[in-house]
Image: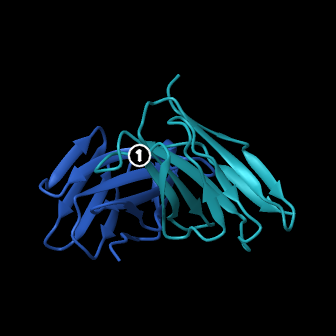
Chain colours: A cyan, B blue
Amino acid sequence: DGGITQSPKYLFRKEGQNVTLSCEQNLNHDAMYWYRQDPGQGLRLIYYSQIVNDFQKGDIAEGYSVSREKKESFPLTVTSAQKNPTAFYLCASSRDGVQETQYFGPGTRLLVL
Amino acid sequence: SQQGEEDPQALSIQEGENATMNCSYKTSINNLQWYRQNSGRGLVHLILIRSNEREKHSGRLRVTLDTSKKSSSLLITASRAADTASYFCATQGAQKLVFGQGTRLTINP
């Protein structure tokens, strides 16, 4: 099965804790993206990567970090600096970063304890 | 901002009726895409229309694009209960895809 997987489905964060959301794709796509979605809202871009070992900040990168050491993987860390992390996080990929359809994973819902 | 704005924010119709959603944006684009999201799930790509195209069809979906008015519409014909979802337009500029806030569509049996 080709596609994008995200884990876990639900994640709980304690105050002051860093947590990492996993995103893996086997579509052989070059570009990968992380979005945040708040209730009743659209998607906002956190970070994106068009190639391995390179990534750029999106519109709301503060309090988040990413890495792209492998083509298949693009993990997102929500750091303690992110004061309002409760949201639905969506990972996506596209064949390349320009003018392409994006394919989305099922999402991770992050809740703060 | 080139962000798309959908109208209406919510739409409720009877099964079998047609549903029309609109999207307006502010700056020039290379393409415009429509996505569907079922509650609590990821987005699914529906259709992409390029800036030099005026209309595209895919099954029961019809998308139009008017670049002079900076607007697009998504028409779903003969709606079904399974079409209940949120629908997002996304505009592609030089670099990134920018999503609107979506239209919540409810199909009543």
- Element assignment for label 1: loop
The chain letter for the residue carrying disc 1 is A
Q: Is residue A24 visible?
A: yes
Q: Please say if B28 is above or below B36.
A: below
Q: Is residue B72 left or right of residue A17?
A: left
Q: Please say if A88 is above or below B47.
A: below
The front one of A18 and B1 is A18
The quarter holding residue A7 reads: top right
Q: On the rendered image, what quadrant is the N terminus of chain B found in?
A: bottom left
Q: Residues within 10 Å of mark 1 (few under 14, many from 20)?
A: many
Residue beneath the point at 63% across and 59% down: A65
Q: Position of residue A52 (x, y in %)?
A: 47, 42
Residue beneath the point at 35% across and 43% down: A96
Q: Amino acid at mark 1?
A: Gln
The front one of A61 and A10 is A61
Q: Position of residue A46 (x, y in %)?
A: 54, 62
Q: Which residue is mark 1?
A: A102
Q: Is residue B109 visible?
A: no
Q: Please say if B2 is above or below A4.
A: below
Q: Position of residue A69 (x, y in %)?
A: 56, 41
Q: Position of residue B97 (x, y in %)?
A: 37, 59
Extreme top residue here?
Answer: A1
Residue beneath the point at 87% across and 62% down: A14
Residue beneath the point at 41% across and 46% down: A102
Q: Is residue B40 left or right of residue A72?
A: right
